[in-house]
Amino acid sequence: MEHLIRYIIDNDILVYAVMALIPLFLWVLPYALFAVWMERKVSAHMQDRLGPMRVGGWHGWAQTLADILKLIQKEDIVPTAADKKLHMLAPFVVFIGSYAAFATIPFSSAYIGSNLNLGLFYIIAVSSLVVVGILMAGWSSNNKWSLFGAMRSAAQIVSYEIPTVLALLAVVMIAGTLNLQDINTMQGGWFWNWFIFKKFPFIFIAFGIYFVASLAETNRTPFDIPEAESELVAGYHTEYSGMKFALFFLAEYANMFAVSAIGSTVFLGGWNSPFGNFLGGPIWGVFWFLSKGMFFVFVQMWLRWTLPRMRVDQLMYISWKVLTPWAFVCVLAVGAWMMM
Amino acid sequence: MPATLLEQVKTSTGRALRSEEMIINMGPQHPSTHGVLRLELVVDGEIVVDVIPHIGYLHRCFEKHSEAMTNYQQVIPYCDRMDYLASMNMDWAYALAVEKLLAIKVPDRVEYIRVIMGELQRIASHLIALGTYGLDVGAFTPFLFMFRDRERILDLFEMTCGARLLYNYIWVGGLSHDIPPGFIDKAKAFCKYFRPNIKECNDLLTYNEIFIKRTANVGILPKDVAIDYACSGPMLRGSGVDFDLRRDDPYSIYDKFDWKPQIGTGEVGTVGDCWDRYMVRVREMEQSLNIIEQALDMIPEGEIASAIPKRIRPNPGEVYVRSESPRGEIGFYVVSDGSGTPYRVKARAPAFVNLAVAPEICRGYMIADVVAIVGSVDIVLGEVDR
Amino acid sequence: MAITMSPQEITAAIKAKFPEAVLDAKLEGVIDPFLKIAPAAILEVSRFLHESPELSFDYLMCLSGMDNGKGMLGVVYHLASMEKKHKIVLKVEVPVATPAVPSVESIWRAANWHEREAFDMIGITFTGHPDLRRILLPDDWEGHPLRKDYKVPEYYQGMKVPY
């Protein structure tokens, strides 16, 4: 892919700029629009109703476009007593934290935004920016409810990063590298080469821990305390309207796909076809990668509309007393196994 | 932190750390306060120290209006609008009070139809209570499933009297319309359709691990506190008190049917917690189905308007009659001075009395629990404020 | 052991303990038999009714304020016993000029909000009530609406009231 772009454009910097922007424009933004529509349809059918049906003709596919157009035109309301600079910056920080993770995720064997040797480490580091953005949003709104939402969210995300990292660590120990493209290449062949089946059952458990912890990372039910509609009106983004609110929204959906993508890359073979070389190759790789990612996005939506919400102390209990110890057990067990 | 520890912790400037209690407003507009209710929460971090409810946002002067009516029947639409989710039971309670004042007896067919409508209304009201309770704790889907089932009940009501929510159906001395042909079959079909849905609701929400964690051992209301605060309905029965007005202060023909009041047993937590109150409502829906099916089989033919008095002019006197609405004891204290206008109509609304116990049972829990507790009280602001 | 007492027996028990408190008793020819109690004695009578093992009136069904006309305001107490299953009605009457009645909140906590409503609507002040303020109407409303001679105010905080 890099060669293709170099062939078209000669300038080095421009090539890298285009490479970095491709995932953003070709996939993430259209995906975000699609995911909002999909969430509304999935939730509707699970609740025995229809969801968007009219906008754009077939099953209301253009609903999100219409919503974005509407949000762009809305008046941007900033509360008088709010901290204007923080209020302005917060959605951008959250947006950047979520989107920057896509730089090192391999979409196919021929394409990765930036082939960092520290790919996984970079992703974890950059997605922590989201916490800062949420705290800024909650504090600057000058609203007790937003503050509550922001504090809860910060506690939640920071606590759940630990089991996430530990679960990923278990796989890194087997792979021996943090480079996501290399991790993917190591899982080539049929589906039993995928990391989730190695050192059974420990990596399996690690995958379970990773998935649950990532639900908390993205503030999805059952861990959606920070934006718990029933309690905090809308949590940390109560006071946001118009395009800034849309940014929070898009950031949430991008985050959902990012964690699903990382999970499927690290545990389930990423762009590898499950049938070895059949339906393999760089172009099919994109299809496999996207379908695995979208499957987990669907599971996240499914869980949101089925389960009730956990209380904040129960959430913390699960993170520190259930997920983290089990993640440690997995890491130790995998390590011991590898040394034998 | 306890006060002494607090004093010992000094900041770098030498002053002691202050931790103050915060006053948060769950304002009149809030997705979870079931209407316009203002709860002032005094919190210490996330723990609630005190809850001060402010009501009166929906006060529509029901009692003053009744004193201006020229006819006792004209008060019935006002009764509808008190607890708008259980209008049949409101009308029925008022009609019972005035009928006792006039000492008239209604025909048998009227009694049976009133029981059927009252129990259908109980199921509809409980469906809303349970659905919105799921919404409060974050489960969005059961809400829609229950509304889907409630639509069928509203279809039955619309078939009979033309209205979906505020019926003006049960009049003093009888009913406004007889049940149309086809009603009995449709009602029987509904009962058959709805029974397995209760099991679906149990699978989806009631025995869900997360829901149990949110509601068990939360908002425990002890028996003696419940009686002291004059709680009634599922609030009282959820605390283990075996008291149901349909059996213990009988009115109408409930003694002809085979049914049992449901009591909280502390199945997954403590007796009197939110889960118990929730479960009492679920089980009551099932009992109501039993009553409806028996009544549909036993309903006699007859007149429904023969006992409606042309002119309601009771002798001077007063009466207090109470009946079991889905939320508890709805009582009407009607005073007549001998003219055609009521002298005083006092409505003792169950949600008004039940809400008074909320500050007591919210202390020491977290903010998220306050939402769960107020949801389990099942208030309708229309009758809290009247 | 639950023995339901008749209204006559209940009246006799109260009269035996508080001979001057019972001003009047209408037990026959009415749908709900009631006793008229002297306002100053209502607290003691209530305590007796609540704590006596044979009477055991532990459930305050309803507490209503009344405008009895002729310059008198009243409070009506509907009591019930969960265990014995008997009921009784107590009435208290005070003049409009000095509408003070002792509060029974310390005996039945249910009376707390009921008395606040009676104060709000009729204007009876309950002495000894921990938190007597308006409950349904705004705190700065003037007048007590359920009195028969109540005139709707023209303006409330700049808004025209009758419409």
Image (cartoon, coloured by chain):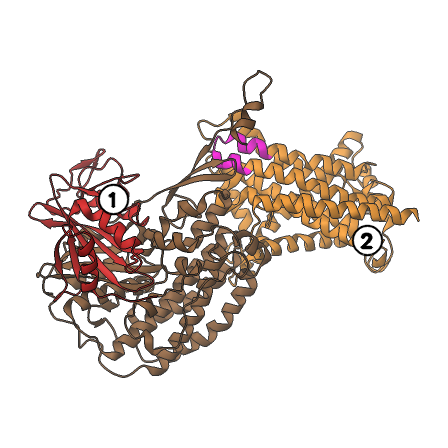
Chain colours: A orange, B brown, C red
Q: Is residue A139 magenta?
A: yes
Residue at figure coordinates x 11%, y 39% from the top left: C97
Residue B325 percent coordinates (x, y): 33, 63
Seen as rendered, the residue at the extreme left is: C70
The reply to whether callout 2 and callout 1 are in contact (CB within 8 Å) is: no
Q: Quadrant of residue C61?
A: bottom left
**Residue C103 - label:** 1
> What is the crowding at mark 1: few (fewer than 14 residues within 10 Å), some, or many (at least 20)?
many
Question: Disc 1 marks which amino acid?
Answer: Ser
Q: On what subunit does the disc labeled 2 rest? A: A
Residue stretch rendered in magenta on the structure = A134-149
Q: Secondary structure at mark 1?
A: loop
Q: Nearer the viewer, residue A239 or A273?
A: A239
> What is the crowding at mark 2: few (fewer than 14 residues within 10 Å), some, or many (at least 20)?
many
Establish whether labels 2 and 1 are both on one chain: no
Question: Disc 2 marks which amino acid?
Answer: Asn
Quarter holding the N terminus of chain C? bottom left
Residue at figure coordinates x 27%, y 37% from the top left: C139
Residue A27 visible in the picture: no
Residue A136 percent coordinates (x, y): 57, 31
Quarter holding the C terminus of chain C? top left
Residue A146 visible in the picture: yes
Q: Nearer the viewer, residue C115 or B125?
A: C115
